[in-house]
Image: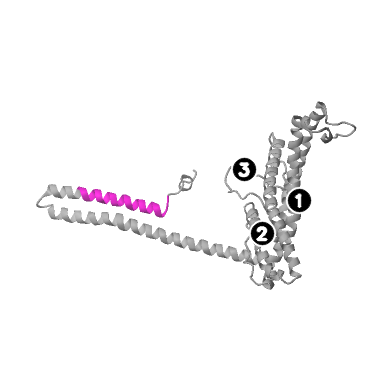
Amino acid sequence: MPVQDAAAGPQGGGEVHSPAPGGDVRPPARGGGGVGTRWLVARARATVDGLEHLVGGMGTAALALIVLAGMLGVAVACLFGVGLRLLPAALRGLRVVAGRERARLSRWGPQLVEPDPVPGEWRAAIGQRAARRELAWMSLHATLGLTYGVLGLTLPFAAVRDLLYPLYWWLLPPAEAVDMGLGWRTDTWPGALAVGPLSLAWLALALIFIPGLAQMQAWAGRRFLSADPGTDLALRVAQLTATRAAALDAHATELRRIERSLHDGTQNRLVAVNVLLGAARRAVTRDPATADELLERAQAAAEQALAELRAVVRGILPPCWPSEASPAR
């Protein structure tokens, strides 16, 4: 994972996060067994993450290489006066590829803000600062980024190739036998078996270099595709405004819910209690048995109203956790 390109997983308790490729993976402090094992596992995880990002970066690098060829064609067409009309369309195509790289890097680190659309007039398009920065990113990512990806994939491929060499060496023509030096060729079983341990050397090189290669591949995107500080501040203000509006909408929705709960539930129960008490009052002298039944129904309705009122109150402010409600003694 490139620098500032770490996996943006949720920060939860007890969750293990892999180190960023290219980061400084140091062994933890002494104080327990298995320190070397934990360091090796952390380094292997960083290598796997770095390999994943190298593969993703190779995809955008291939697209950037195609756009670079198109931009060169537009530059040649500019010599004949027709390329200037094609320039805004070419920059919009570059913006699409750069947007994919911004999205890729944003998944593993701080978000990269999408700039304003490319203007339709060629002078304004080439004068846009974001477009010029994307041109610089394209030239670097289409060449160096693709190279870093190829080098990163070569190391694990070579490790697998040498590890499996004893299984297929006898199928190769004698001219393709590996020369181990000092006249030792791998056209015999002992020589073929001696190639297998070389995979450990390739694996060690992969653990050492792949995280750094992923870091260098992502550098151009982080350097040239990031927005200006003012743009980032404006995005934060817009996000805060949207969050505040969402909170106000949620508050209004909750108030309407409480109002419906009180009107449809508790208020109706209390009205029923009032009606039953009035009827019991009128019947207490002429029919005590009926009055007693009405009072019992009124009591039941009052208990239901109290239960519904408690439910509404719990919906307004849920009860605290036991650890918060009762301090430790």
Q: Quadrant of residue 224?
A: bottom right
In which image quadrant can residue 233 be found? Answer: bottom right
Give me the C-alpha separation between circle 1 and circle 2.
18 Å
- 203 or 234: which is nearer to us? 203
Kindly identify which residue carries mark 1: 147
Which of the marked residues, 2 or 3, is nearer the chain's N terminus?
A: 3
Could you tell me if residue 137 is visible in this image?
A: no
197 is within the stretch colored magenta: no
Q: Residues within 10 Å of mark 2 (few under 14, many from 20)?
A: many
- Find the distance from the CA under tag 2 to the CA under tag 3: 32 Å
**The magenta segment:** 296-318
Alpha carbons under labels 3 and 1: distance apart: 32 Å
- Mark 3, residue position: 16
Q: Is 68 on the left or on the right of 14, as rendered? A: right
Q: Dot 2 corresponds to which residue?
A: 98
Front residue of this view, candidates 123 and 299: 123
